[in-house]
Amino acid sequence: MDKTLYLSDLDGTLLRADQRTSEYTNRVVNRLVDAGVHFSYATARSIDTAVRVTKGIEVDIPVIVHNGAFIVDSVTRHVLHAEKFTPEEEGLIWGAFLSHGLYPLSYAVIDGRNRFSYLREKCGKEQWAFVLSRTSNAEDHRAREIFSVDEALDGDVYYFACIDDEEKLRPVYEFLQDKFRCIFSRDIYTDAPWLEVLPRNASKASAAKILKEKLGCDRIVCFGDEINDIPMFEIADEKYAVANAAPELKALATAVIGDNDEDAVAKWLAERFTKFCE
């Protein structure tokens, strides 16, 4: 049996532009996992939204979420591995944002549940739109409105995200980038500037190594489209950029495959494992 871990990014890679996996992709992944192929995905999304956008993938697979902060069983939602901040780190990060008039979303495990906290009156237009995209879904119970900054660091915090003007976010990024895992990029759907801050050891690459060991694999083949996939590409044995990928990622790729809207990852897998996909 192939002892390779096949690991795909979601948005812009495995997902189409409508933020869903196609019926074809679902069928290919389900068949391969049922046949014993080690397939997973690594995403910046939470497990809640990741499961929704990959609804047709019905097999039980461990997945990497929040850019590597968690490895989670996609069916039971049981956490297999987690990274989190110390209380001192939480205070340092929160203070860095506040000193520049920014109020990030803080993600934490509170009373055994994954929650994200927000101050409604402090959310800019794009950040508020993101909050609404989560609170409008009746199945998503993570949103937690707070009414003072003192509540923002409740629970075990593992992730901060802030959506605002680039010039306001940049000094925070420059201050924190050597201390934590920071991702400063633009959303592929809205083009809004995002700053994400994770524990130092949290990344798709570090989580991929842990998952590879848990599954007893000896190789990693990965697929991606954005700069937050660079660490994963750097540790993979083979790496494939979709045609719509960032130039920086294409430069690291073993090869460039088709577009995400053409089900490029699923087609690549189907060609690799023809006997399971006929």
Image: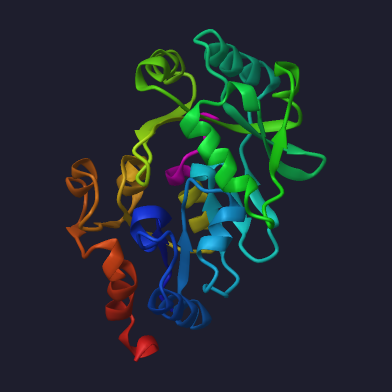
Taking depth in this image into account, of 257 and 55 the one nearest to the observer is: 55
Q: Is residue 112 magenta?
A: no
Q: Is residue 203 magenta?
A: yes
Taking depth in this image into account, of 30 and 130 the one nearest to the observer is: 130
User: Residue visible at 30% across and 62% down?
Assistant: 260
Q: Is residue 249 above or below residue 169?
A: below
Instruction: Give coordinates of residue 170: x percent, y percent.
Output: 37, 17
The quadrant of the image that shows the C terminus is: bottom left
Q: Is residue 236 above or below residue 167?
A: below
Q: Is residue 18 visible?
A: yes
Q: What is the residue that sits farthest to the top in this orientation?
A: 99
Q: How is the image coloured?
A: rainbow
User: Residue visible at 21% across and 65% down?
Assistant: 258
Q: What is the residue that sits farthest to the right in this orientation?
A: 111
Span colored in magenta: 197-206
Taking depth in this image into account, of 126 and 32 the one nearest to the observer is: 126
User: Residue visible at 73% across and 27% down?
Assistant: 146
